[in-house]
Structures are given as C-alpha cells and as structure tokens.
Amino acid sequence: MALYTSDSRDRVREAVDFVELVSTRTELRRAGPSRYEGLCPFHDERTPSFGIDPVQKVYHCFGCGASGDVFTFVQETEGIDFKAALELLAERYHVKLEREAENAGEAERRKRRERLYAVLARTAAFYARYLWEAGEAQPARAYLAGRGLEEAILREFAVGFAPHAWDRVLAASKREGYSEQELLEAGLAQRSRESGRTFDRFRGRIMFPLTDGRGRVIGFGARAMGDEKPKYLNSADGEIYHKGRNLYGAHIARQHAAKAGRVILCEGYTDVIAMHQAGLRETVGLMGTALTAEQVAELGRMAPVLVLALDADSAGQGAMERAATLAADRSLELQVAPLPAGSDPADLVAQRGAQAAREAFDATVPFVRFRVERIVAAGDAGSPEGRDKIVDALRPVFAAIPVGATRLDLTRFVAGRLDLTENLVAEMLAAPRGQRRPAGAGRLNESVADPTEIAFLALCAALGEPGQRELAQLDLDELFAGEPMRRLARLLVEHGTHGIAAAADPELAPLVSELLVTAAGEPPDQELLRLQRYQLELAALERRIRRSRAGAGEDSVSELAQRRDELKQTFDRAYSAALEDGR
C-alpha cells in the first residue's frame, strides 16, 4: 500500500494544535514554561500525572507510562492505526496529504474505495432529506416521534427513509456516474437471482447510517415500517462494511465517553439515539450483530468502564455473559444498568423522561453482583436440593472474584437469600482463584527511567545548547546505570532537544516523551544542573564500590569510599548554598 510522503506527515504534525487536541480528552492547565498537565486519559486517576509538551508535541503519563506524539495520541484515543490517525488529523487541520508513488493496482484500489465512500455518503444524505421532505415518509416520522425522538437528534444521527420505489437510488446514482457494480459493492443494490435485474437493496424502510471511527458512512441498518420481514436489514459484508467491527454512534460518543470515564452499550439504533437525547452522550450500540471481540476491544479503548444496557430478555442476558467473557482479559470494568422487564433504554427515556434515565444510569451495579443476583433469583431457594444447585451455579462465578470486600459482601448476600450461615456458604463456594488482571489497570512503561537520571537530562534539555555541551563532556557509560538511559543521553548530545524525538527508535520513544514532558516543566537552571550531576556521580561511585566489594571491580574500595565522601561534602555545600538562594 502506498504511503503518504514524509513531508505530508511533517506538515500535519506542524499544523496540529496539541493543547487543543489533547483538551478534547482531558482538561489541561499550564504547569511550566512549556508544559501542560491534567488527568491522564489512559487510566483512572484523581491527581494529575499526565503532561504534554505543546512545542515538541509529545505526551507522557508518570502514572501509567503512556507516552507518544500527536499521532500516537490519536491512535490510542481513537483506536485506529497510524494511517487513519494521519488522515484524521489532516482532515481536522486542513492539510492536504501527498502520497508516495504507488503502482497502478494500488492507485486503482484506492480510487475504487474512495468512490464507494462517496456514493455511500451521498446516499445517506439523500435518505436523510427524504425522511423530512417526502409525503410517503410521514409514517416513519410518526413512528420516530412516537418513540419520543426529536428532529434535532435524528438529524444529528442522519436518520433517513428509503423510498418504496425499486430503483430510486440506483437511477440517481447512475446519473451521477456510478456504475451498477459500484452500487453492488457498496451494498446499496442487489441483483435478482431469477431475472438478473439490479434494484435498490433498501426500500420503504427507516435508514440508520452505520459509520466507522472517523464518521464515514460504511453501510446502513434499515428498519421495516410494517410487517415486512426481516424487521431489521443491514448492509451485507463487502469491501467497506464488515459486520461486527464497528459500533453504532461511536464517532459521536467517543469524546463524551472519554470525559465521562465510561461507555454505555445498547442493542438498538433508537436506543442509542434516545440515550443521546437524554444527555447520556457516551452511548453506543451493536450494529445488529452479536457482540464481537473487535467491538469489545473498541469499547475498551473508548473508556475504562463499560455499562451494559441490554434488553432484559434472554438474548440480552446472553449478550451480557458474552461481554463478560470477552472482557475478562482486558482492563475493562463491567457494570449493568438493570432495566424494567420488557423494556429497553428508548422505552425508559420515553416513558419516564430524561432525568429518570440519567438517574437509572447513575445507579448501575457491578456485573458480578448482577450475575450473582440473577442466578439466585432464577433458582429454587426453598429446598435443600435447589439451594445446592444455586451454589453449584455460583461456584465458577465466585472462583473469579478475588478475596476482598466484594467477595465478602456477595457471600453475605447469598447466605441471606439461601438462609445459610456465611461460613458454610463461603466453604461451599471456595474454589482456586484464577489469576486476573485488575479492572482498570494502567499500561506500564517497560522502559522505566531512574528519577535522578531523567531529572538531570531534563535540565540539560531545558538549558538547550549549554546543557547539551555539559552533557557531551561527561562519561555517559559511567554516569548512567542502564543502557537505555545512556542511549537517551547520547541522542540528546547528538540531536539536541528539538531533534531527539525524530531520531529516537520506537523502543526508546517512551523515554524520549518522558524526557521532553519533564523538560517542558523545568526552568533552565545551571546550578540545579550541577546539583543533579553531583547526585549522579555519587550514585555512580556507589555502584563502583558495590562491584569492587563483590570482586567484580579493579578499584580500591577505600579509595572509592574516600572519593565518595569528598563528593558528598561538595554536594552538601552546594545544596546548602542553593537553599540560601531560595532554589
């Protein structure tokens, strides 16, 4: 696949307002000459440990270790690859991308996909206009209004209506230069097996555009108005649309989910729209499919907490169980919003109002509690045999619950409902506990920087060329304990503050981000740099003393200890002077 030119990538990077971009995910405040900080958008925290350098356009979290540049930030927060992140930023900041030379086959495939996206977008706009302007769409407007959905929110989601005519979209698209084959590949038309005639796939239905993470239309979900079967008809899998990869409304909900710290999952399209209308803007929906691993991965990228708002019927309950299975190995905390029997989120909003819906979703319960309560309620607690069966059903659930307050609380609940002692229930439920990653655990940076070493390099970086010269005069192999930090120091000597990010390899990129973000908050201070250097030299002497004592060094331990003591006295004098100066 042909790539975009390096000049294009550089122009996009330069165009990005990094403070504005990151502020869509977390509130930032100035914390240094060239540094902003805020709560980390990648893990749950109450005290800010996340910082950015808006000049170098890098970020680093000192809590979970997440780090990177403008493209990494978009990749991680949007759940997309580098190419998609580049295209999204180019579109947002109005930068024209230029491609490297591509062969004829690649160029043809790219142009074909661009035309498919274009005809899908054009058709979605037509359906949306038709819903509000056409007389035959009046029953659809009445149905949507009867569900309590207002015109403004329906327009935001581009809800439309497909005419009853057999070839309205087909004929209009042909007039615009699209071929039958393109309409078939876009999923807008289909061919009769008997006659071979091509006709519109969607007719006389309410149309819900399905989009990818960038908001591009990739297909449609279509609801029948009468008794026509199937009730819902989705686009068929093709070059653009792939069932089970995307979530309905994710392009609208993503930013709200990041700020809310949770994402709500519903089943139906109207459920999602109703929830957004009620102010629960972090809501997304399944696209008429069973929940997939790809969708769970996308949900996990959107927020650390997933609230399941699925129907109370057996299918909805099964979807919850599947969600728990798929989320078991991910940093995704599951909660449930218990819905009244026989109702869905859209019914809740329509019947009880937006405020009641918001209150209901503020009273969610952990999935494990919901699951335990459901098993107990479904069993026969009135007989010894029934109680044994309930405990049997609960045993695998409790096997996955770590020892702690949650397990104790649920044991007490079960004991109370089964009229058994807590000790007996605990004994009956006991099972080897599996190793599970705690929900909400942050990503850890594998290249961990020594605080003293990173602080010294950050001061060198903050000082610019004087700090670079100072660093060049030092024995880096002796001064720094590990090879990653030595490499980082050499990069700073060779490329300076403004060139280090471009020169670093992917393995070192997290340390570079941490260095630059730390440096952005440090005022240039030559004396403070000298103090930090003394600390590094003291640490280096301690390492040499340990090696010599272990027989791995050639230096005299007594001579090294004397040099250490002399350096310690020098450091103490300099440190006292710095305190007197108010540093």
Image (spheres, rainbow, N blue to C red):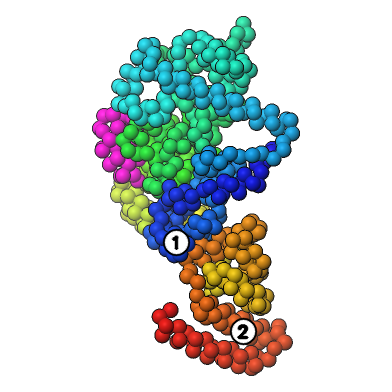
| Rendered image: mark on residue 572 | none
For mark 1, what is the residue? 49
Type of residue at label 2?
Leu
- Callout 1 secondary element: loop
Q: Which residue lies furthest to the front in this view?
A: 465
Total marks shown come to: 2
Type of residue at label 1?
Ser
Q: Residue at (65%, 87%) from the top-left corner?
A: 549
Corner quadrant of residue 30: bottom left
Q: Residue at (49%, 34%) from the top-left corner?
A: 215
Corner quadrant of residue 578: bottom left
| Rendered image: mark on residue 541 | 2
Quarter of the image with the C terminus in it: bottom left
Q: Residue at (42%, 39%) from the top-left corner?
A: 253
Q: Which residue lies furthest to the top in this view?
A: 195
Corner quadrant of residue 31: bottom left
**What is the magenta range?**
337-365
Q: 108 or 460: which is nearer to us?
A: 460
Q: Residue at (69%, 31%) from the top-left corner?
A: 107
Is residue 156 part of the magenta span, yes or no? no
Residue 208 in the image: state x and y as whole percent. Answer: 44, 25
Q: Tell me, yes or no, if residue 284 can be seen here.
A: yes
Q: 377 or 293: which is nearer to us?
A: 293
Quarter of the image with the N terminus in it: top right
- Callout 2 secondary element: helix
